[in-house]
Image: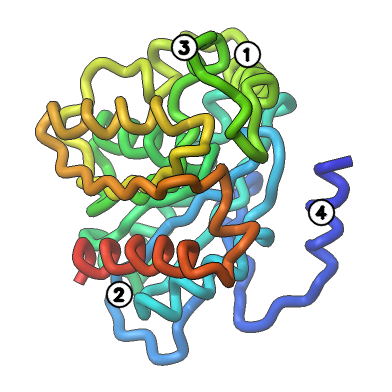
Amino acid sequence: MLRASIHLSDLIPRCGVRTIAVNGDVTVRAHLPKNLKEPSPALLWIHGGGYVLGTARQEDFFCRMVMQQTGFPVVSVDYRLAPEHPYPIPLEDCYAALRWLSVQGWVDPTRIAIGGASAGGGLTAALALLARDRGEVAPASQLLIYPMLDDRTSDRTDIGGTNLRVWSAESNRFGWDSYLGDADRDIAVPGRRTDLAGLAPAWMGIGTADLFHEEDLVYAERLQAAGVPCELEVVPGAFHGFDRLAPWADVSKDFVAKACRHLQGALD
């Protein structure tokens, strides 16, 4: 039902967006400013949905907002979803989109940021690791918005759920199990990776009423300990996806504006 409702939104027409095939399995939605100065910085955006839900199209409003505030193109990737397509397929789809973006003539390959929210943030962190390990494309920044980073959070008994909204430990366990399948979790899960040195500088935003609050703080601290600059924005009382569910709220506008200012500082 959730997948059906999300795909129904694909019937709503959008303006000023191009859907482009990266390969036979992956497409992107490119949001391009009218006055694009080439070669331009760019953001590769990865949608959320617990690794099992979502489309790039659902991110149109957010991508347009980031494009308008930064002046940069924003390219959102439609990766294949678990459980039909478990790890590493979604990650490889994102990597294919990153490589595709890096060879577009209108993009400066040294000024590409990668970013995502929730599971998209988890894929962003994994993509930063994969890009570092392969050495073919070097992202200039990673934008981690309440990222889904560590499967072990689902098994914790010391996290009270009374103040949490939108995303529960049960949903979290289903998403991770669907995505990981039989994969080696020490490799597939960003929060389990031991070597974080050499990654792109990061901006991370998380609310205190989010299931991912503690795992995100730990990851931010580990990035900093590994010598990776990480700017951390903690929003008191904010729940998972608060900026999407209440984009008109001042706290949401401020949150997105800070992320956009980080992008401008990292890519300009």
Residue 256: percent from left, percent from top: 42, 64
Residue 258: image quadrant is bottom left
Mark toward the start of the polypeptide (2 vs 1): 2
| Cβ atoms at labels 3 and 2 below 8 Å apart | no
Amino acid type, label 2 = Ser
Q: Which residue is mark 2?
A: 40
How far apart in space, not on screen, are marks 4 and 2 (Cα)? Answer: 31 Å
How far apart in space, not on screen, are marks 2 and 1 (Cα)? Answer: 38 Å
Determine if residue 260 is in view. yes
Q: Quadrant of the C terminus?
A: bottom left
Q: Nearer the viewer, residue 211 or 200?
A: 211
**Taking 132 as reference, is 140 above or below it?**
below
**Taking 187 as reference, is 48 above or below it?**
below
Q: Residue at x 58, y 72 (%)?
A: 248
Q: Which residue is mark 4?
A: 7
Residue 192: image quadrant is top left
| Cβ atoms at labels 4 and 2 below 8 Å apart | no
Secondary structure beneath dot 4 equals helix
Secondary structure beneath dot 2 equals strand
Q: Which residue is mark 3?
A: 185
Q: Residue at x 48, y 31 (%)?
A: 212
How many neighbours does mark 4 have within 10 angstroms: few (below 14), some (14-19), or many (20 or more)? some
Amino acid type, label 1 = Gly
Mark toward the start of the polypeptide (4 vs 2): 4
